[in-house]
């Protein structure tokens, strides 16, 4: 999935892909790190329970 996304973006000269994951989602964070995406910041109190 990520390979397709990156290829699609390069073909269209997209220079930034922005992904969002809830910090409590350990599996999601792990997947992004495996794909070598950088964490640029976090949003405090973004989700209301």
Image (cartoon, helix red, strand yellow):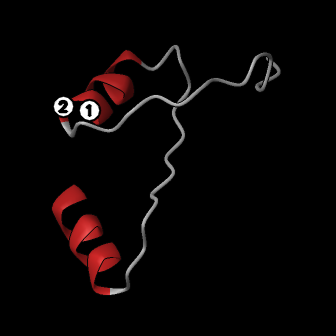
Residue 21 pos. (x, y %): 51, 33
Q: Quadrant of the C terminus?
A: top right
Label 1, secondary structure: give it.
helix
- Which residue occupies 46% across, 60% down? 16
Is 28 on the left-hand or right-hand side of 36? right
Quarter of the image where one finds residue 48 = top right
- Does residue 43 lie above or below 9 as drawn? above
Quarter of the image where one finds residue 12 = bottom left
The residue singled out by tag 1 in the image is 31
- Does residue 42 lie above or below 18 as drawn? above
Residue 42 pos. (x, y %): 63, 23
In this view, the residue in front, 4 or 38, is 38
Residue 46 pos. (x, y %): 78, 26
Distance from disc 1 to disc 2, alpha carbons, whole Å, reads 5 Å
- Which residue occupies 38% across, 33% down? 38
- Label 1 with label 2: CB-CB less than 8 Å: yes
Is 19 on the left-hand or right-hand side of 4? right
- Does residue 36 lie above or below 1 as drawn? above
The residue singled out by tag 2 in the image is 34
Crowding around mark 2 (Cα neighbors within 10 Å: few <14, some 14 to 19, many 20+) is: few
Label 2, secondary structure: give it.
helix
Residue 8 pos. (x, y %): 29, 78
- Which residue occupies 59% across, 26% down? 41
């Amino acid at each position: 999935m990520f390979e397709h996304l990156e290829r699609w973006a390069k073909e269209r000269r997209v220079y930034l892909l922005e992904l969002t994951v809830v910090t409590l989602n350990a599996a999601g964070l792990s997947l992004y790190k495996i794909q070598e995406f950088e964490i640029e910041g976090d949003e405090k109190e973004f989700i209301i329970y």
